[in-house]
Image (cartoon, rainbow, N blue to C red):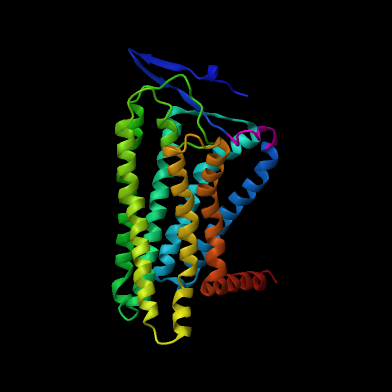
Amino acid sequence: MEHDSHTTWEFNGSFYQPSAFLMMGIPGLEAFHHWISIPFCVLYLIALLGNCIILFVIKKTQSLHEPMYYFLSMLAVTDLGLALCTLPTTLGIFWFNIRRIGFDACLTQMYFIHILSFIESSVLLAMAFDRFIAISHPLRYPSILTKTTVTKIGLTIILRGTVSLLPIPFLLKRLTYCGKTELSHSFCFHPDIMNLACADIKVNIFYGMIALFSTVGMDFICIVLSYILIIKTVISLATKEECLKALNTCVSHICAVLIFFIPMIGLSMIHRFGKNFPPLVSTLVAYTYLIIPPALNPIIYSIKSSHIREALFRALRRKYESDW
């Protein structure tokens, strides 16, 4: 077990900055970390393999070279990034009890976790827009969502996430920190680091809220509005069969939206307003937010999308026949 005494300090006048933070596993269950690591390993393996398979199938199948599947590829890449961001520190704690992470390394991990989260939110909005155009304006769909348009949307999403969060690490580096260096999670999270400071953090709180509401908050509102318009279009369809068929194309996306936004909003609320919540609740919500979506999204889309399922079966059949 590492203690705070292992953390060295740099002193510059009245400015204190720890050289490292100590991460936390699952509070109260430290003795069972080796056993707890088993389901985590399974989830990480599903996330890595599942998203790689989705990317492989879409790349190799010409019929899937459409806007809907380009956006799904973006989602898969983002989910891979999220899984890889948290995997080393989480399994490092569970397997080897490596709790120490350097200050700059922590800020880097935090930056990429938040960027990828914001990008995932924007990709889910792009997918909602795709479903709205496909259902409400099917004849104009190919002319609206061209490859050029999809590429521009993808680049805008990356630029938006990167730029909106760029000040966050610098805002944290300017703060003076107290003697406590223990984080609440097995990864670095902005509100968690911010709350360890002894300085005035009003600017950090204000900018964090502005960044969150102007990106994820707006994305969620626009997704809800998209589905209101989709439902309005679906209700106007002539038959019940047409109505169900149109809604069925949205099921996978709705599931992806729910498993991403519900834990994300819950974790943000807990960090900002839930000081009296047990630490275990915050930990479980954080793991649900960062590990469950990357693991479940490829499963959801593989089950619900007949095109991906058929392409996967064809790829497996070709592989089987070539082996024989």
Q: Residue at x 31, y 71 (%)?
A: 146
Looking at the image, residue 316 lies above or below residue 122: below
x, y percent for residue 320:
66, 70
Extreme residue toward the top, this view: 13
Give the percent coordinates (x, y) of residue 100. Answer: 54, 27
Tell me the quarter of the image containing the N terminus: top right
Front residue of this view, candidates 254 and 57: 254
Percent coordinates x, y for residue 159 in the rendering: 31, 50
Tell whether 53 sits left or right of 141.
Answer: right
Q: Nearer the viewer, residue 306 or 287?
A: 287
Residue that sits furthest to the bottom in the current view: 238
Residue at left 53%, top 20%?
Answer: 4
Residue depicted at 40% across the width and 31% down the height: 194
Does the rendering let one see residue 35? yes
Side of 254 relative to 139 (left or right): right
Magenta highlight range? 25-32
In this rendering, would 62 be left or right of 219? right
Instruction: Quadrant for the C terminus, please.
Output: bottom right
Can the viewer see residue 134 in this picture? no
Above or below, 45 against 252 in this view is: above
Residue 29 among those drawn in magenta: yes
Locate residue 214, reporting x and y percent: 30, 49
> Which residue is depicted at the point 62% across and 46% down?
40
Q: Main secondary structure of the magenta part?
A: loop
